[in-house]
Amino acid sequence: MHILSIGINHRTAPVNIREKFTFDASTLHEALIRLRHTKSIFEDVIVSTCNRTEIFVVADQLHTGRHYTKTFLAEWFGIEKEQLTPFLFIKEDEGAIEHLFRVTCGLDSMILGETQILGQIRDGFLTAQGHQTTGTIFNELFKEAITLAKRAHSETAINDNAVSVSYAAVELAKQIFGRLDDKHILIVGAGKMSELTAKHLDSQGVSKITVMNRTVEKALELAKRFSGQAAKMSEMAETLADADILISSTGSRDTILHSDFVKKAVKQRKGRPLFMVDIAVPRDIEPAINDIDGVFLYDIDDLEGIVQANLADRKEAALQIELFIEEQLMTFKQWLQTLGVVPVISALRKKALNVQAETMKSIERKIPDLSDRERKVINKHTKSIVNQLLRDPIQKAKELAAGPDANASLQMLIDIFAIEDDVQEEKDLQDRKERAKQVTLDTSKPKTAESDAAKVY
């Protein structure tokens, strides 16, 4: 079995490309199950945020895993594979494991050390687990990744003065205006990112916040928490005419603010500048709005400059976390290698017990008058001999599996004990069990999604 990570992130593609490849929370379970049903794929987890869409799979072969996962992405988003490939990254086995650890710890984020990604990875994993698309390998791997990230956050200063995309948006507004406590802020959207934005604004002393959302109840709920007011989307024109800053983060698949609309609002502002930050993916605000006089529009990619100002202490902490990752990577690799030794140990034990069983039959033929008690005593002691003889070879097999030349060393052990056929039988049995899980998936109805976390930023 092999582990692969394939996807698009802020390092491989700009926002106008990334926004085309985000999974809807409402259909995420369908994507997970469709990929899990794909040939060569035994486990899968999808992580989809504003900065990344990444797919983790366990595949029987590297080349087929790559091929079928890329094909799935192309078909799901309705694009030719050749158009998708230039923006993809692919990491395999150890590289994929290390990548997951780095992502979960916040070392691969646009804002180094941000903690939000931990929750997104956890929710993405739980969603996959809830729809039965994870198994032995990913259940262990993601558990270790989440535990590692928690350790990184608690034992280092990586998340001191916590930052996120929403925090960077507020920092950018501060750089432009100098102070925010006398400004009217319009927040469009009432999801997690908007909540984080409101928290950061509140910490800056902002007292006039208007929350606007398609569902007015949600806007009202968020506004009340920060002594703000709620508004309907239909009130955008008059609200925009009065606001100093607009920060937008909705889950809309389509643009919600167009240049013609904003031009009309600007005419009512009497020359006052309008600062707009679009932290949604797909983008909420039409890029052409940036060409309107008096309007300053920034999208999620523009925030990277703000990010750089907060990196000094975090880079030092990141070096410490790198050591944590090395340690955890070694631990997981050792665990993974023990999976490969299981068929060898099972075959070795099976062959030895078969010899013991045949010996018992021979004894019973040659000494037919044995009492039940004598038979039980002999059977118990011959099994004890077998177990004692197996103890050292089994321990050695485990050590060999964790060594640098595990495959060659285990093969030598297989040859010495002549258990090649037995090992293959055990491997075939494991494969049948894995495929039986897939059959169960094929015939079962998908569960209702318990979380829309895969769409969270």
Image (cartoon, helix red, strand yellow):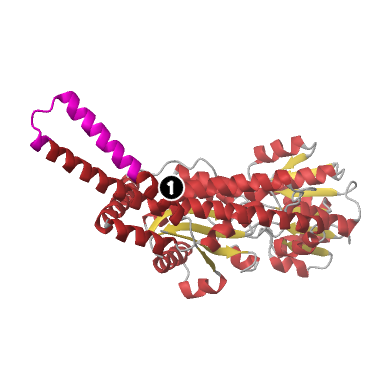
Q: Give the range drawn in magenta.
A: 364-389
Q: Main secondary structure of the magenta part?
A: helix
Say if residue 99 shows up in the picture: yes
Q: Could you tell whether 189 is left or right of 385 in the image?
A: right
The residue at 38%/60% (across/down) is 60
Residue 58's spot in the image, x, y percent?
44, 57
The answer to if 345 sits in the magenta stretch is: no
- Residue at label 1? 136
Looking at the picture, does residue 123 appear above or below residue 372? Answer: below
Q: Which amino acid does label 1 sit on?
A: Thr
Looking at the picture, does residue 204 appear above or below residue 310? Answer: above
Residue 315's spot in the image, x, y percent?
76, 59
Quadrant in the picture for residue 323: bottom right
Quadrant in the picture for residue 7: bottom right
Quadrant in the picture for residue 35: bottom left
The answer to if 381 sits in the magenta stretch is: yes
The residue at 27%/59% (across/down) is 420
Looking at the picture, does residue 12 appear above or below residue 276? Answer: below
Q: Could you tell whether 436 is left or right of 185 in the image?
A: left
Say if residue 112 shows up in the picture: no
Front-lying residue, 305 or 343: 343
The quarter of the picture where the N terminus appears is: bottom left
Q: Callout 1: 10 Å neighbours few (<14), some, many (20+)? A: few
SS of the residue under disc 1: helix
Front-lying residue, 165 or 182: 165
Q: Could you tell whether 105 is left or right of 444 in the image?
A: right
Residue 277's spot in the image, x, y percent?
75, 58
Give the number of marks. Answer: 1
